[in-house]
Amino acid sequence: MAIVVNMPRLSDTMEEGTVATWLKKVGDKIEEGDILAEIETDKATMEFESFNEGTLLHIGVQEGETTKVDELLAVIGDEGEDISSILSGGGNTTETEEKEEVAASTSESSSETKTEDTTKASADLPEGVIVVTMPRLSDTMEEGTVATWLKQVGDTVEEGDILAEIETDKATMEFESFQSGTLLEIGLKEGESAKVDALLAIIGPAGTDVSGVAANFSAETSSTKEDTPKVEAKKEAPKAVENTSKAAPKTNKPTPTPVTENGRLYVSPLAKKLAEEKGISLTKVQGSGENGRIIKRDIENYEPAAGAAAVGKFVPSGQEDFDEVDNSQMRKAIAKALTNSKFSAPHYYLSVEFDMENAMAFRAQFNSIPDTKISYNDIVVKACALALKQHPQVNSQWFADKMRLNNHVHVGVAVAVPDGLVVPVVRFANEQTLPQIGAAVKDLAGKARNKKLTPDEMQGSTFTVSNLGMFGIDTFTSIINQPNSAILSVGNIVEKPVVKNGQIVVGHTMKLSLACDHRTVDGATGAQFLQTLKGYIENPVTMLV
C-alpha cells in the first residue's frame, strides 16, 4: 500500500520547508533509513530520512520549491502501484485519512493549527481540551526527558508560557505552550522519558475531568511502547540481595530508599546538579521533600556513613557495590552516531608533529595587545579553515550516489560536557579573525556546558577539531563526526630535545592526528592537507596575510 510522505517538521519553529536537494529520484528503491532529500528549514539545511521501504513513486515538491509542513512531499509504495487517487486528492492510506481528520478538527482556530505536531484535538475530547504530546525539538530526537516542569496541575497557562524544560539528544530546551487554559494533567513526571508524540500534558477549561482522556490516549499508544529490561532488572535486584545477605557481613550503614517510580529517582534539577559536583550518589541520599523528593538541602546535609568493621581476621570488610545511571538522551545519541560512523566509514589515520616555537612567540605577541586573548586552539581552528579552502576534498561529505565538495568552511569544535560531548560550529571560520574565532568558541563552549546550545548552533559542520592538549594528552585519535570526511585530534605542546641545524636543542612540539574517511579522502590528499596546515601553524603570521 502506498505511503504518503509529508513535509516534516524538522525544528520546533518550522512552518514550511524548501527542498534543497533530492537524493533519490522517481523509480529508486528506498530502504528504511535512506536519506530522501535535504530540506532547508528556518534554521538549517537538514537531511530527511525515510521511515518506510518501497519504491519512490512520486515527488510532490521539486528542488528549490517550498511547501507547508504536512503538505505532500513524496509517495512511496510498490513498484508500478496506481497512486492516481492519492495525487487527485482522494488518498488511499490510513495515515492520510487520520491526518485529514486531525487537520479538520483543528482548522477552527489558528492557534490550534500551528501546533498540530504537539497537540491533538478531536471530537472525542471534551470541549476546549487539548492533548499536548512530546515535541520533536531536534531533527534526530526520538524521545525526550522532562528535566523540569515550570507549571503545575491547576496552573493557568497562557499562550507563549514555558511549560517545561525538555532534555533532548542534543540539549535541554524550553518548551512553550501554544494554547491557553488550565494545566489539567501532567503525563510525565520530572526525570521520566517518553517517545516523541507520547502524552506530555493536557490543557483545557478549569475543572474539566480528563481522567478518561489520559487513559484512552495511553491505551492508544501502548502498542508502540516497550518496557525496558533495565526497569525489570531493578525490580528484581532486591531479591538477589536478600538471597545473599546471610553470607554478607552485617553493617550499621543506613540504606536510604528515595521515592522512585518506574525505576527513576525523584530529585530536583538543582539537587541533581549539586550531587554531580560533590560526587554524591543520589541512590544513597534520603529525600526530605514532598513525597520523598531529593532537594537541595538533602545534598548539602548529606554525610557518608562510616564503613563497616571487618568480621573475623581473614574476612574482608569490603562489599560489592555499584551505582546505576540512566543513559541520558545525549549519551544515547552519541553512542548511536559514533557507532554508525566507526562501522560505516573506513577510517585511517595520519599522524604528524609540528614545531611550535613560532606559534608560541606569535601567541605571546598577539596577546600583548590590550583586551586581546587567543588560545592555541584558536590558532589551530583558523589554520584548519584556511587549509581546507585549499583542499576541498578534505572539506567534503559522502553520500550514497555522490560526493559534496563544500566551498564554505564550518569548523565543528568538540566540547566536553557532563553528559558526554557536543560539537558546536564556528561558521565561515576562514573568514573570521583569530579574536573572532576565540570569542565564538568561548561563547559556544559556555552554552554547551549550560545546555543552552540551539540545534542550529550544532549543525552544518564540514570539518571537526578535537583538542585534548589542555588535559595533558600528547596524542590520540578520534572518530569522524559524520557527515564530515575528517577530524583533527590535537595534543599537548611538549618541551623536548629536538635537532635543529645539526644540533640538539630544547624545543616545543605538538602532535596531531588526522582521521580520514577513505571513501572521500585518499592518503595523499590527507598528507597534502597536513603539509599546508603545517605551514600555517609553524608560521602563523602567514594567516594574517
Image: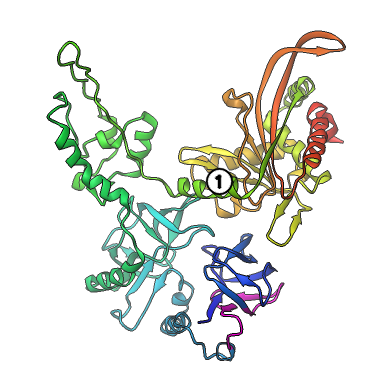
Does the magenta segment cover residue 493?
no
Residue 61 sits inside the magenta stretch: yes
Looking at the image, the residue that sits furthest to the front is: 79
Picture coordinates of residue 432, whole percent (x, y) = 75, 43
Going 20% across and 12% down the picture, which residue do you hit? 314
Seen from the viewer's position, the closer of residues 277 and 369 is 277
Q: Amino acid at mark 1?
A: Leu
**Where is 409 relative to 506, above or below?**
below
Say what secondary structure mark 1 lies in. helix
Answer with left or right where residue 295 lies relative to residue 430: left
**Count of numbered labels shown in the rendering:** 1
Residue 285, placed above or below residue 126:
above
Using the image as rendered, state which of residue 317 and residue 457 is in the foreground: 317
Q: Residue at x 81, y 39 (%)?
A: 524
Q: Is residue 11 visible?
A: yes
Quarter of image, res 223: bottom left
* Position of residue 285 measured from the top left corner of the image (x, y, whole percent): 24, 35
Residue drawn at x 49%, y 73% is 114
Q: Position of residue 44 (x, y in %)?
A: 63, 59
Query: Does residue 398 sit above or below 536 in this rendering?
Result: below
Q: Residue at the location (60% across, 30% down)?
A: 468
The part of the image, by quadrant, that contains residue 81 is bottom right
Please give the residue where the numbered disc 1 appears in the rendered image: 338
Q: Position of residue 392 (x, y in %)?
A: 80, 48
Q: Is residue 375 above or below residue 6?
A: above
Badge 1: few (under 14), some or many (20 or more) residues near its Cα, within 10 Å? Answer: some
Residue 263, visible in the rendered structure? no
Image position of 10 (left or right of 191): right
Q: Which residues fall within the magenta stretch?
A: 57-83
Nearer the observer, 417 or 209 = 417
